[in-house]
Each structure stands twice: as structure tokens, then as C-alpha cells.
């Protein structure tokens, strides 16, 4: 299963995005996702089982605690937890699920029939980065024709 530009655009059309995989440590990847999405004016809902807030965003203990208006869900966790999170998001009614590259496993793709599932892509590279390593990666992939079409 290959990600397409249409899949990615559908994910970002939703202005309410839930994130799982952020850390209380501000230098972690999940925190960069939160900051970038907020910078792009998305409303971010952070899922963390123990934190009250991360990057000044209220944390929800689980997917079940999320408000109904969440339309997209980003997962950046250990491969062993991914499928359970994808299944819970689908059950909650979330239609767009992005599994960060290297967080998927050999059976994650089977959920693609139940939602708009994006695999093997870096969300920060596709969030239209204006600077930094993600913009550089995007430029390189674009130059070689490797961005999803």
C-alpha cells in the first residue's frame, strides 16, 4: 500500500488532529509534531496516559476520552502498540489515521479497508515545512520524484 497525495490531503483537511506518542520531554519527535501542527493552526488533541498537558495542550488518557470532533489521528509509538491504537481510532469513528514511518508492523496495512490509512511517511515532511531537516528531506524526495502522487 502506497500513500498518495489524495490520502495525505484528506488527512490534513481535518483541522482537529489527535496525537499519540508525544513525550513530556520537549525535544522528542512527537512534541515536534504537536508544535508544527499548532503552528499550522490545527487544533491538537494529545493522548498520554499520565501527563496532564504536553506543549501546553491538555492530555487525554485514551482515545475513548477524545471529543467527537477529532477527524484525524497520528500515531508515533512502538510497533507493538500500533494496531491496537489504529483499531481503537476506527472504533471511535476517526476516518484518517497516519502511522508514522517505522511505527507500523507487518499487519498494520490490513486496516486500510476501514480508514484512510497512511503508512511509511513522515508527517512533518508533508506538513509543508518551511525550514529545517524536514523541508530538506521533502526537497530531496521531490527532486527525485519520490513524493506520493
Image (tube, rainbow, N blue to C red):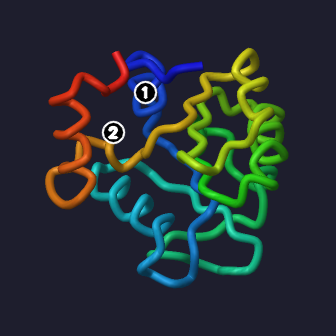
Q: Earlier in the sequence, mark 1 or mark 2?
A: 1
Residue at horizontal 52%, vertical 20%?
A: 2
Q: Identify the residue at horizontal 42%, vertical 45% (top origin).
A: 123
Where is residue 96? Give x, y as percent. Answer: 59, 30
The secondary structure type at the circle numbered 1 is helix
Q: Position of residue 7 (x, y in %)?
A: 48, 21
Q: Residues within 10 Å of mark 1 (few under 14, many from 20)?
A: many
In the shown orientation, is residue 3 left or right of residue 51?
A: left
Q: Nearer the viewer, residue 137 or 124?
A: 137
Cα–Cα span, label 1 and label 2 = 8 Å
Tag of residue 30: none
Q: Quadrant of the C terminus?
A: top left
Local SS, label 2: helix
Position above or below: 13 against 22 = above
Q: Is residue 118 left or right of residue 146?
A: right
* Residue placed most toward the observer, 115 or 18: 115
Q: Position of residue 141 (x, y in %)?
A: 25, 34
109 is higher (above) or lower (below) than 26:
above
Q: Which residue is mark 2?
A: 126
Is residue 95 rendered to the left or right of residue 62? left
Q: Quadrant of the N terminus?
A: top right
Q: Residue at 21% x, 27% y: name it.
A: 144
Q: Identify the residue at horizontal 41%, vertical 28% (top origin).
A: 13
Please tell me which residue lies in front, 53 or 12. Answer: 12
The residue under label 1 is 8
Amino acid at each position: 500500500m502506497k500513500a498518495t497525495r489524495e490520502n495525505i490531503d484528506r488527512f490534513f483537511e481535518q483541522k482537529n488532529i489527535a496525537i499519540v506518542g508525544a513525550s513530556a520531554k520537549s525535544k522528542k519527535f512527537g512534541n515536534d509534531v504537536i508544535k508544527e501542527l499548532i503552528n499550522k493552526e490545527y487544533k491538537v488533541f494529545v493522548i498520554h496516559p499520565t501527563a496532564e498537558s504536553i506543549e501546553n495542550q491538555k492530555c487525554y488518557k485514551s482515545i475513548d476520552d477524545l471529543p467527537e470532533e477529532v477527524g484525524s489521528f497520528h500515531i508515533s509509538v512502538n510497533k507493538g502498540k500500533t494496531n491496537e491504537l489504529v483499531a481503537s481510532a476506527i472504533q471511535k469513528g476517526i476516518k484518517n489515521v497516519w502511522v508514522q514511518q517505522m511505527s507500523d508492523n507487518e499487519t498494520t496495512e490490513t486496516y486500510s479497508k476501514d480508514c484512510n490509512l497512511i503508512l511509511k511517511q513522515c508527517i512533518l515532511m508533508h506538513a509543508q515545512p518551511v525550514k529545517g531537516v524536514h523541508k530538506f528531506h521533502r526537497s530531496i524526495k521531490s527532486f527525485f520524484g519520490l513524493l506520493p502522487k
